[in-house]
Image (cartoon, rainbow, N blue to C red):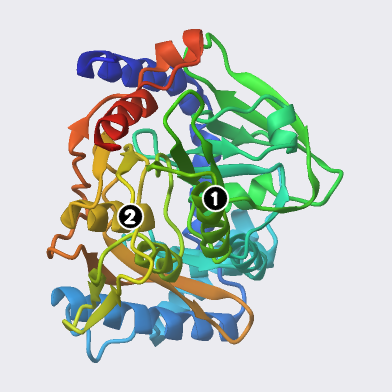
Amino acid sequence: MEKPEEAENRLQAMEGFLQEEMERKKRSRYFWNGVFTGAVCMSLLLTCIYAGRMAYQLIRVRAAGTGTAENSDTESVVSSETLQKIKTIEEAIDTYYFYDEEVSSGDMREGIYKGMVSALGDPYSEYYSKEELEDVVNSNKGISYGIGAYISMNKQSNMAMINGVMDGSPALEAGLREGDIIYEVDGEATQGMTLTQVVSLVKGREGTTVSLKIYREGEGEFLDVDIVRSRQIETTTVESGIVEDTDQIGYLRIREFDSVTVDQYTEAMAELTEYGMKGLILDLRSNPGGDLLAVVEIAKKILPKGMIVYTEDKNGNRKEYTGDDTWELDVPLVVLVNEYSASASEILAGAIQDYNKGTLIGTTTYGKGIVQQIHRLNDGTALKLTISAYYTPSGKNIHGVGIKPDIELEYDYEASESEGVDNQVERAIEILEGKIK
């Protein structure tokens, strides 16, 4: 088992390995940050007014939540001084700006919208272009275009990472593995990008090639991987089966919570029950979350009657999600979690722990206890904004804290690589075998 100090050394080694390349890409990164904070790039007055109105609403929301903004109820972002300054900056850009690649006025307009949402200081709030919104909607429906990999954020490096690959996918054929850090996409450094931005770069038209620069723990150099994008892939978010050489112990892994996950979970559980399952390992490791309603529906099929989760907005308005005991799980349960189990997966794990319905094994979860909602705009774009905090049945908000498992057990990477052994699954089997009568 990996000791805490070994895990820390492993993280420091990765950070040191990446630092030199990050410095080399710093100048390029500054440029893209400038594009995305794009308040200096307005070229059309009417677009300024539209963007300003949107910012005004956002700042009112923020000020009402914090009570710190000066004159927040009466002062608008849009003013004659603001518009004049934007015009002055635009003229300066037209006169002096130089770069190897021309930035279109469309990119500039997108930049100002992204910049206003970024100014909220909330890493979970985003502005979506039409194309980005389409990707988000398709992903929630279980539809993927591209390489067939699950991508989430690595909390320590704040970079995108592979948290799973789909069977028969280009990603699997190219040798991508869970835990791979995506350092570059087509030569563009991903440091500082949101998950949406990285995913949009990875996806693309069928038959085109995407080049990834990958950091993999234990490798002395970056790995350069070229992958030919495939046609539309239907995402399988649930994997299941009976664990070999056990007394009918079932294993079910949920990769993420999409609208298709509920049906996939229901089908998997029906099969496991038909096989005579006597105990269940529910694997939520590296599950970044997803749809709130999807995880609630799955929780209803596990928990006893009562509260599953409740949310509260900035005004204290509370919304409760409850279930009955119609489909309550009737076999012993162990839940596997790690530091990348976030959001919806924490809702499910937290409720199971509060009801003492199962044993949690692994490491403390990510700690994302807030809820986002997509607000569509008239031009086909959208905002994803944080609207409330969620609480486990016992009233805990785990934002920034995470859920501490009942049994803390670090994942043994060395045993996995050398022997193909998952020490956390092995521990789960031990516990379930002791409970199966």
Name which residue type carries label 2: Asp
Q: Residue furthest bottom?
A: 74
Residue 87: where, in percent of width, then height?
53, 75
Three-letter amino acid code at the position of disc 1: Glu
Q: What crowding class fits label 2: few (fewer than 14 Cα within 10 Å), some (14-19), or many (20 or more)?
A: few
Total numbered badges shown on the rendered structure: 2
What residue appears at the point 20 percent right and 84 percent down from the top-left corner? 317
Give whichever of discs 1 and 2 has the lower sequence position.
1
Residue under numbered circle 2: 330
Q: Which mark is residue 274?
A: 1
Q: Nearer the viewer, residue 166 or 66?
A: 166
Q: Could you tell me which residue is drawn at 44 percent across and 86 percent down?
A: 53
Q: Image quadrant of residue 364?
A: top left
Image quadrant assignment for residue 302: bottom left
Q: Residue furthest front?
A: 437
Q: Residues within 10 Å of mark 1 (few under 14, many from 20)?
A: few
135 left or right of 25 in image: right
Q: Quadrant of the C terminus?
A: top left
- Residue 120 in sight: no
Residue 252: tell me if it is visible.
yes
Viewer-proximal residue, 3 or 332?
Answer: 332
